[in-house]
Image (cartoon, rainbow, N blue to C red):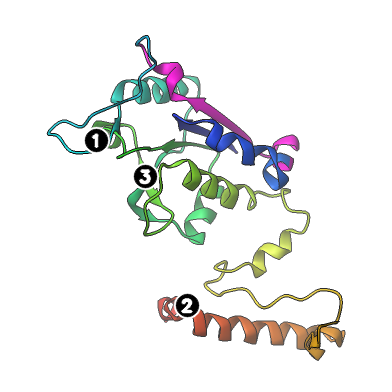
């Protein structure tokens, strides 16, 4: 998978891409993640990428020219399955969305900033809009990292134990079961006996019940969506 990130603040994105799973995925050649600085596509002396909105109002808006120049230059080099704009008013991002996007070969992630981007960008270049939650962030850089992390971990060969994905929260519309590790007793708190029993059938049944109970207690809406 190749992911191109278009942003006016590349340093906000660069750090996490050099750590942990994202670093290993790139080193293994399983993912290629390229960050593009919008200021490289600005044409004026000051490398301006934003301006005040027409009609007045507070805040700044990312200009059309550098975004079009950057995205169109990428499209001349290769074809992309989607150009995704990260925005608070986009489609809610879910695990099901992550799974479907992880099957694609190449994506562009456009990071808004300030008050967003010139609407003509959304009307012309963007093919999908995603929101990571019902709240507002300074820009789309952090949401872009959320999307990248959630996609890359799904790629075959990235995780050492691929089967662990099947037990992740939301993978099948259920939350994950409680997890324990050594020591078996800590400050008087003991690990459930079933997890120490060695009986794999009983352990699977216990975990399935815990997942359903936890989902019912914390996210009953997920169970309602299944019915």
Question: Is 128 above or below relative to 55?
Answer: below
Which residue bears the numbered disc 1? 119
- Residue 3 in view of the camera: no
| Label ID, residue 128 | 3
Mark linked to residue 42: none
The residue that mark 2 highlights is 219
* Residue mark closest to the camera, 3 vs 2: 2
Mark 1 and mark 2 in contact? Answer it, CB < 8 Å. no
Nearer the N terminus, badge 3 or badge 2? 3
Residue 95 vs 226, above or below: the answer is above
Q: Note whether 193 is above or below 27 in the view shown.
A: below
In the image, residue 205 lies in the stretch drawn in magenta: no
Q: Position of residue 165 (x, y in %)?
A: 67, 62
Q: Is residue 169 visible?
A: yes
For the residues bearing labels 1 and 3, Cβ distance under 8 angstroms: no
Q: Is residue 29 magenta?
A: yes
Q: Quadrant of residue 51?
A: top left
Q: How far across and how far down the image is residue 169, in percent?
A: 59, 69
Residue at the image position 74 percent from the left and 35 percent from the top: 27
Mark closest to the chain's N terminus, 1 or 3: 1
């Amino acid at each position: 998978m190749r992911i191109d990130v278009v942003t006016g603040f590349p340093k906000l994105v660069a750090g996490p891409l050099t750590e942990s799973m994202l670093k290993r995925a790139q080193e293994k050649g399983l993912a290629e993640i390229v960050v593009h600085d919008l200021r490289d596509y600005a044409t004026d002396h000051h490398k301006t990428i934003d301006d005040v909105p027409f009609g007045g109002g507070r805040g700044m808006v990312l200009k059309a020219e550098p975004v079009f120049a950057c995205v169109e230059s990428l499209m001349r080099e290769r074809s992309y399955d989607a150009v995704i704009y990260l925005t608070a008013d986009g489609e809610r991002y879910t695990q099901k969305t992550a799974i479907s996007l992880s099957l694609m070969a190449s994506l562009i992630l456009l990071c808004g900033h300030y008050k967003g981007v010139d609407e003509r960008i959304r009307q012309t270049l963007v093919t999908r809009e995603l929101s990571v939650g019902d709240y507002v962030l300074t820009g789309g850089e952090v949401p872009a990292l959320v999307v990248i992390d959630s996609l890359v971990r799904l790629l075959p060969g990235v995780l050492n134990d691929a089967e662990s994905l099947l037990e992740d929260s939301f993978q099948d519309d259920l939350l994950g079961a409680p997890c324990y590790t050594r020591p078996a007793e800590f400050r008087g708190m003991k690990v459930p006996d079933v997890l120490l029993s060695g009986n794999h059938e009983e352990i699977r049944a216990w975990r399935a019940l815990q997942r359903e109970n936890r989902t019912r207690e914390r996210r009953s809406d997920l169970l309602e969506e299944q019915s």
